[in-house]
């Protein structure tokens, strides 16, 4: 079971690393240093939180959040919807999730990993000093049990 878990985590982390827009990947409940640094975004945060061991498979559920930092324009602007890069952030983070999930669904891999389920991505918009925007999605990845071979 340990080997299957490692393979699934490594697979998911590497899939998000392959996306050209991703700058940083944070795994688990680790503390991220200075989130005000602009060069760490877009940031992918992956948290494993549920396992389902079966007779011939191992399934791991992940929460994945893709975030970007909003740059608030301090200039007075009558058209408030364009006073910051909120729309750009949402578009960019949605693209990272969409492309990565699509790759997982359509590409074959050496371990027989498959996407069991993916839910709708939920929007994330924070509004305090460190304004982060993006999406959060829950996905289930499974792998055939390596003990069967």
Image: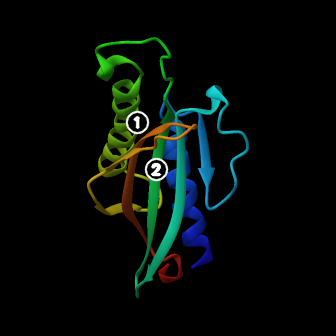
Q: Nearer the viewer, residue 7 or 48?
A: 48
Give the residue drawn at x 47%, y 34%.
19
Q: Nearer the viewer, residue 42 or 81?
A: 81
Image: 119 above or below 43? below
Place of residue 10 in the rendered image (x, y in percent of width and height, measured from the top left): 58, 56
Q: Identify the disc placed on residue 106.
A: none
Place of residue 32 in the rendered image (x, y in percent of width and height, measured from the top left): 69, 48
Of marks 1 and 2, which one's residue comes earlier in the chain?
A: 2
Left or right of residue 94, residue 52 in this image: right
Mark 2 residue element: strand
Q: Residues within 10 Å of mark 1 (few under 14, many from 20)?
A: many
Residue of label 1: 93
Q: How many marks?
A: 2
Quarter of the image with the N terminus in it: bottom right
Give the residue drawn at x 40%, y 82%.
56
Q: Nearer the viewer, residue 28 or 13?
A: 28
Place of residue 8 in the rendered image (x, y in percent of width and height, measured from the top left): 51, 62
Q: Quadrant of residue 36?
A: top right
State the separation of the CA atoms marked 1 and 2. Answer: 9 Å
In the displayed orientation, state which residue is furthest to the bottom.
55
Q: Residues within 10 Å of mark 2 (few under 14, many from 20)?
A: many
**Circle 1/circle 2 CB separation < 8 Å:** no
Give the residue drawn at x 61%, y 55%.
27
Q: Nearer the viewer, residue 49 or 15?
A: 49
Image: 137 above or below 6? above
Q: Identify the disc placed on residue 65.
A: 2
């Amino acid at each position: 079971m340990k080997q299957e878990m490692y393979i699934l985590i490594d697979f998911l982390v590497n899939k998000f690393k392959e996306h050209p827009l991703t700058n940083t990947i944070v795994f688990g409940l680790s503390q991220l240093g200075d989130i005000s640094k602009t060069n760490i975004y877009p940031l992918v945060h992956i948290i494993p939180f549920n396992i389902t061991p079966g007779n011939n498979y191992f399934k791991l559920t992940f929460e994945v959040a893709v975030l970007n930092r909003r740059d608030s324009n301090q200039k007075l602007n009558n058209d408030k919807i364009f006073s910051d890069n909120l729309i750009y952030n949402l578009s960019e983070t949605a693209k990272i999730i969409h492309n990565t999930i699509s790759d997982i669904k359509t590409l074959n891999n050496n371990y027989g990993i498959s996407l069991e389920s993916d839910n709708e991505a939920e929007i994330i918009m924070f509004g305090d000093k460190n304004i982060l925007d993006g999406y959060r999605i829950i996905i289930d990845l499974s792998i055939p049990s390596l003990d069967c071979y």
